[in-house]
Amino acid sequence: MAHPVSTSELKVLILAASYRTESLNRKLAAGAARLAQKYGAVVDLAMMREFDVPLYDGDLETSNGIPPGAQEFRRRLLDSDALILASPEYNGSMPGIVKNLIDWVSRFRPQPFDGRHGLLLSASPSLAGGNRGLWALRMPLEHLGMRIFPNMFSLAMAHKAFSGDVIADATLEKRFEDNIHGFLELAEAAKNYPCMKKAWVEFPGEPPGAGVDRVDSASS
Ligand SMILES: Cc1cc2nc3c(=O)[nH]c(=O)nc-3n(C[C@H](O)[C@H](O)[C@H](O)COP(=O)(O)O)c2cc1C
């Protein structure tokens, strides 16, 4: 077994972007939670229903503000050091429910995705494992300033792959574990050993200007 990530608490929010009771992505998220705990992380395993929001509507935002489901997601995100998101692939892209949640949560200022570390996972009965959906999901999250871990994990033939929340094939389970561990190590390093050098973070969704040009600096 690799070393535990750290003796200091690393808090990880883990979410499967599916409402389905028998969701394969929920199983993968549960597996990620089990492994993250094995390496010493404190896990908040969330359910999509906890973040129910209406379809984004600018008029609704003006009249009612940002809905409670998005406020709750923001609270849990800010309370964590990193996010692990297990998402199905729908028609070669991400499910609408997850993009809709991202859109609502992106309306907060300061924008809560900015600068946070994320790991993307997918599970699908298909042979590609939902990997195209993750490339689509990277786009809005990186656009919002998240640091998405380069290695993404996609589980193919997922309907036949699990034994409980463990991937039955030992080689694949090891690869999954290494992916989770590598991500936790990076998130832990970013939390406890922030780079002393200032780094400019691109936020292409806004016009340039002092208010939106963001400089991410070491906290002390
Ligand atoms: C509307 C819709 C579109 C889908 N499109 C894809 C797809 O493009 N690629 C894929 O691998 N699976 C696709 N699937 C199958 C899902 O991967 C499968 O239903 C999966 O179990 C959903 O994730 P969940 O089990 O976590 O709910 C699609 C399913 C639905 C309902």
Image (cartoon, helix red, strand yellow):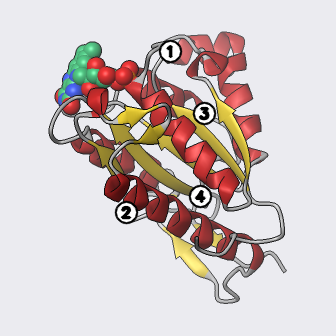
Q: Is residue 136 left or right of residue 58?
A: left
Going 72% across and 39% down the picture, which residue do you hit? Answer: 44
User: Quarter holding the N terminus?
Assistant: bottom right
- Distance from disc 4 to disc 1, alpha carbons, whole Å, reads 23 Å
**Picture quadrant of residue 34:** top right
Which of pointers 4 and 3 indicates the residue nearer the eye?
3
Q: Which mark is residue 212?
A: 4
- Distance from disc 3 to disc 2, alpha carbons, whole Å, reads 25 Å
Q: Amino acid at mark 3?
A: Val
Question: Label 3 belongs to which residue?
Answer: 105
Q: Amino acid at mark 4?
A: Val
Q: Which mark is residue 151?
A: 2
Q: Earlier in the sequence, mark 1 or mark 3?
A: 1
Q: Earlier in the sequence, mark 4 or mark 3?
A: 3
Question: Label 1 belongs to which residue?
Answer: 57
What kind of element bears circle 4?
loop
- Badge 4 local density, few (<14 within 10 Å), some, or many (20+)? few
- Distance from disc 1 to disc 3, alpha carbons, whole Å, reads 13 Å
